[in-house]
Image: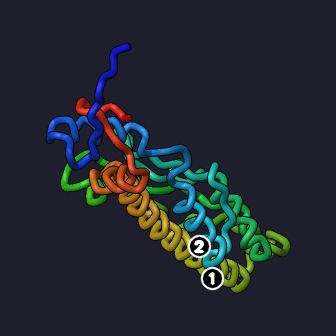
């Protein structure tokens, strides 16, 4: 019987080129499924608590590849707003097809190159509570126009706050994404798990 001795190394004992190979290999699995869950959950809870809008994770879309973006399903946003202001006669909100932020690929850093979806000034369709013939009366017409303007202002304020929260979420997701792929994080994982390696970088 022939016996062989195999040397086993800690990560820090490997040579530079092998350490780089190990880091790259671990990077491939650093983004485990659902790594974003806690950030998205915090966002949804915050929106529910502060804006009284109830979204699910499936309503939210984001990406870090070439199509760098974060967005909410516009029909769901419309539905939530109409539900929130139904007692004031809100029946529809004119929103862009994709409500959120999108990269314009012009450089200057990813976050600085984002375009915000634009919302028009008059976005609310409001149902008149009385007889529509009453709107021929100049006083009642002015009162209705005032109500519509106040509702527009309220809805736009909520949408601005929602945009702010989405921007913060996108930045947090990007930071978490980059950290998980960083040398710092991977070295920490190797140390915590006390991984040992062969000279070529294979796990022992």
Q: Nearer the viewer, residue 32 or 133?
A: 32
Residue 102 visible to an observer of this rendering: no
Q: Which badge, 1 or 2, is on the more N-terminal residue?
A: 2
What's the residue at 66%, 64% (across, down)?
125
User: Which residue is labeled 2 in the image?
Assistant: 46
Residue 27, position in %: x, y? 35, 41
User: Which residue is labeled 1 in the image?
Assistant: 146
Q: Quadrant of residue 170?
A: bottom left
Residue 30, position in %: x, y? 41, 45
Q: Callout 1: 10 Å neighbours few (<14), some, many (20+)? A: few
Q: Is residue 1 left or right of residue 32?
A: left
Q: Which residue extends farthest top?
A: 1
Q: Nearer the viewer, residue 78 or 10?
A: 10
Q: Callout 2: 10 Å neighbours few (<14), some, many (20+)? A: some
Structural distance between the alpha carbons of marks 1 and 2 = 31 Å
Residue 75, position in %: x, y? 65, 52
Q: Nearer the viewer, residue 102 or 97?
A: 102
Residue 100, position in %: x, y? 47, 56
What's the residue at 62%, 53% (across, down)?
57
Q: Nearer the viewer, residue 155 or 162?
A: 162
User: Above or below — where is 17 with respect to 171?
Assistant: above
User: Above or below — where is 138 with respect to 66?
Assistant: below
Colouring rule applied to residues = rainbow
Query: In the structure shown, which secondary structural element does the residue marked by tag 2 occupy?
Result: helix
Image depth: mark 1 or mark 2 in front: 2
Q: Is residue 64 left or right of residue 144?
A: left
What's the residue at 54%, 72% (across, down)?
156
């Amino acid at each position: 019987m022939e016996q062989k001795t195999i040397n086993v190394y800690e990560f820090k004992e490997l040579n530079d080129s092998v350490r780089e190979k190990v880091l790259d290999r671990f990077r491939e699995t650093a983004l485990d499924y659902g790594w974003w869950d806690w950030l998205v959950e915090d966002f949804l809870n915050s929106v529910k608590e502060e804006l009284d809008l109830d979204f699910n994770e499936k309503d939210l879309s984001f990406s870090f590849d070439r199509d760098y973006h974060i967005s909410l399903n516009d029909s769901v946003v419309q539905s939530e707003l109409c539900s929130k202001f139904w007692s004031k006669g809100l029946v529809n909100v004119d929103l862009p097809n994709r409500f959120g932020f999108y990269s314009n690929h012009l450089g200057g850093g990813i976050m600085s190159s984002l375009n915000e979806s634009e919302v028009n000034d008059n976005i609310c369709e409001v149902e008149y509570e009385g007889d529509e013939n009453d709107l021929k009366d100049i006083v009642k017409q002015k009162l209705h126009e005032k109500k519509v303007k106040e509702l527009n202002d309220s809805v736009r304020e909520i949408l601005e706050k929602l945009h702010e929260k989405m921007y913060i979420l996108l930045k947090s997701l990007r930071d978490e994404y980059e950290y998980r792929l960083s040398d710092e994080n991977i070295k920490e994982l190797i140390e915590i798990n006390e991984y040992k390696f062969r000279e070529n970088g294979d796990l022992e």
